[in-house]
Amino acid sequence: MTKAPRTGERDPARGHGDTDERPLASDIARVLGDPRTWGSGVSKEGQPGDGGTFGETVADNLKLTQGSRVAVIGGGPAGSLFSFFLLKTLALIDTEVTVDIYEPRHFDHCGPAGCNHCGGIVSESLVQILATEGILLPAEVVQRGIDSYVVHMDVGSVRIDTPLHEKRIAAVYRGNGPRTSERITTEGFDRYLLDLAVSNGATVQHKLVTDVKWPEGRPRVVCGDGAEATYDLLVVASGVNSQVMHIIEELGLGYKTPSAVTTFIAEFHMGQRLIQQHLGTSMHVFLLDIPRLKFAALIPKGDFITMCMLGDNIDEQLVNTFLNAPEVRRCFPSATVPTNCCHCFPRINVRKARKPFANRLVLIGDSGVSRLYKDGIGAAYRTSKAAAMTAALHGISEEAFAHQYWPACRAIDRDNMIGRLIFGVCHLIQKLRFSRRAVRRMTFLEQTTPSSRRLMSSVLWDVFTGSAPYREVLVRTLHPAFIGGLAWNLIAGNAPNARVREDKTMVS
Amino acid sequence: MTDVLGKTYRPGEIIVRQGDLGDCMYVIQDGDVEVLKEENGVQTVVDTMHTGDIFGEMAIIEHTVRSSTVRASSPARIMTVDKKTFIRRVQEDPSLALTVLKVMSQRVRKLDLEVATLKQELGRETTSAEPSTGRRIHGD
Ligand SMILES: Cc1cc2nc3c(=O)[nH]c(=O)nc-3n(C[C@H](O)[C@H](O)[C@H](O)COP(=O)(O)OP(=O)(O)OC[C@H]3O[C@@H](n4cnc5c(N)ncnc54)[C@H](O)[C@@H]3O)c2cc1C
C-alpha cells in the first residue's frame, strides 16, 4: 500500500537519524547496556532533562495519580495495547486517569489511508498470549488461520505442519484490506485493538501530532489543526514511518531514533477459492539465491495475497526478479503473477532506539525496540505492556522506566543479536545449494516419518514464525542430535543417486 | 472455515481426558464445553464453560494428570496455550500469571458456594429425616 505523504511525516531524504558522529562500538555497547550512564540530557528549550516541573526532581513525585493525563501518539498495536493495559491495571488500584490516543488514520478505510503497512502475521506465541490475556481475535479480524509453512527453494519445496494441527497463527489486515477490497465484514487488527482501548476508557483524537514541546518539564502535544494540550505522561508509539521520533530526538532528552530499512509489500487479488487451492492455510516463505534478497513470503488472506520482501535497497528490479522466479510463479494459477492492486515501501525497525524513556516520556513498539525481522507486533505487545505496568505501578520517572521498562527492551535487543547470527546462517543456506538440499531433505523426512524428532522442522518453524526467542532456536541447533542429523543429511542429500531418488519422491 | 483460529470440536467430542498427562492449557475461542468428573466409572457433569473461559491450567502450574474430562457441549473452537510459551512469558511479565490466578480464584469461590449449598441441602435432608442428629451433615 503506497504511503500517502503527510505533513509531519518524516522526509526519507533525511536518512535514519543515527548516521553521524558514530561513537566507538565498545562505547556503544557499554552505554546502551547500562542505563545509568545515559544521563538525562537537556531539552532544546533549555529545561532540565529530568522532566519534572521546576523543583520536582524526586522520582517519587513522578507517579500517575487520580486525574492524571496521558497522551499516546499513535494508535497502532503498541499505542492501543499500552492504553488497554494501563487503564486495566489502574482500574485494579482504583485510579482514574485520562488517556488520549492521537491517531489520524481511520482503520476502517481500505487501502493506504487505513493501513499500517505490514505482513499482518500475528505470531503463534502472541496469539496464545493474547488469548490468555482475554483478547480473542474474532473471525472478522482473522483473514486466515495459518497452520503450516511451506518453504520454497530451488531444490524443491517442503511443508512444515504444526504438531497439533491447529490454527494458531493469524493472518490479519492492519487496515480494512487493500485498495480494491470491498468486504464490509472485515475488521482490521489495529481497529480491533483501538476499540479495545476505547472500551477500557481511552479517547481517540483523530489528529496528526505535528510537534511536541516540553514547557516546565511537562510534555505538550501540538496537533496539525493547531490544538495543544499538556499531559503528565507522553507515550510515543508512532512507529518508524513517522516524523514524531525525530521531534522527540530533538528535545534532547537522550533519545535517539532506531535504525530502519526499507521493505516492500504488495497485495494481489485472487479470490478465496483460488487462494485456498493454491496456497491453502499455509504461509509460503522463499529461500532463494537472489542477490540483495534476505527474506520473502506470500501470506494468504481472505480474497488477497500479501507479499512481503526484506532485503538490501529493495527496488523495482529486485521485486521483478523475485516475482519472475519459477518458485514464486508456481504459487499462482497458471504460473502467472497477477498485477498487484496495492503496494508500499514501509520501513522496518532493525536496531533499537537509544534511551527510549525520560521523566514523563516513554517510547514503545517500533519507535523503541522491536524484534529483528519477525513478530514486530509481538514486540509491540511486550514493550507496551512493560511500559504500562511501569507507569501504573512504579511511576513515570526516568528511574522507574530504567529499572522496570528497560529490561523488557534489553531482553528483546539481546535476543536480536543472536537473531542476526541465525539470519546470517539462513542467508548462507540461501547461497549454498548443497546446504539447501540437506535442509529440505531433513525437514521432509521429519514431516513424513511420524516417529521422528522434529529437529530441523522446529528450528525452521520458530525462525519463520518468530514464535520462540532466537536464543532458544540457537540452543536447539547446538544439540548433538541436530548437528548429527544435519551432517548426515548433507551427505545423504548430496550423494548423486540420492538426489535422483529424492527428486522423484519429495512432493513439492 | 479458514478465517478462524484454534481447533474445532463437534458436540460430544473429548478435548481433554481425566488421567492424561497434560502440558498445555486451553482457551475457549467460541462455544461451550462441559467438565466431567469420573468416579468409580460414573461420569458427573461438574461444570460448564463458555467463550473466553480457560481450562486445563493446573497442568501448566504443576506436572500432573488432568483432574477431569472436558468435552464440547456445542460446536466449539478451542485454542491450546503451550506450557513453555506461557511460562516463558510469565518469567518476563509475572502479571500474566494473574489471569490464571483469577480463573483459579473464581473456581475456588464457585466450589465454596457449591460446597455450602450441598451442605445446606444435606443438612435439610438430614434434619427432616433425623431431626435429632443434625451433626451428621459431614456425612460419613
Ligand atoms: C514489510 C513489513 C512486514 C511486517 N510484517 C510483520 C508481520 O507479519 N508480523 C508482525 O508481527 N510484524 C510485522 N512487521 C512489523 C510490524 O509492522 C511493526 O512491528 C508494528 O506495526 C509496530 O507497531 P507500532 O504500534 O509500534 O507502530 P505502527 O504499527 O507503525 O503504528 C504507529 C501508529 O502511529 C501513528 N502515527 C504516526 N505518526 C503520527 C503522528 N504524527 N501523529 C499521530 N499518530 C501518528 C500511525 O498512523 C500508526 O497508526 C512488518 C513490518 C514491515 C515493514
Image (cartoon, coloured by chain):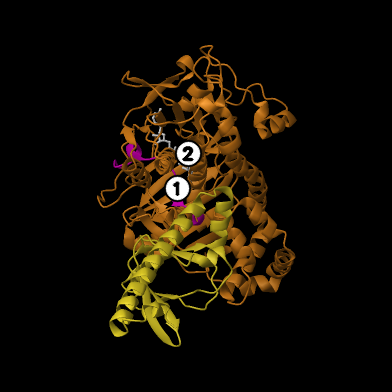
Chain colours: A orange, B yellow
- The image shows residue A24, relative to residue A347, as above or below, that is above
Tell me if residue A269 is in the magenta stretch.
no
Residue at disc 2, CB closer than 8 Å to ligand 1: no
Cβ atoms at labels 2 and 1 below 8 Å apart? no
Q: The residue under label 2 is which amino acid type? A: Ala
Of tags 2 and 1, the one toward the viewer is 2
Q: Which residues are magenta?
A: A108-125
Q: The residue under label 1 is which amino acid type? A: Gly
Q: Disc 2 or 1, which lies upstream in sequence? A: 1
- Residue at 50% x, 23% y: name it: A248
Q: Chain of mark 1?
A: A
Q: Quadrant of residue B50?
A: bottom left
Residue furthest toward the bottom?
B41
Q: Write down the residue under mark 2.
A: A388
Q: Write down the residue under mark 1.
A: A119
- The image shows residue B92, relative to residue A27, as above or below, that is below
Report how many numbered discs are placed on residues in the image.
2
Secondary structure beneath label 1: loop
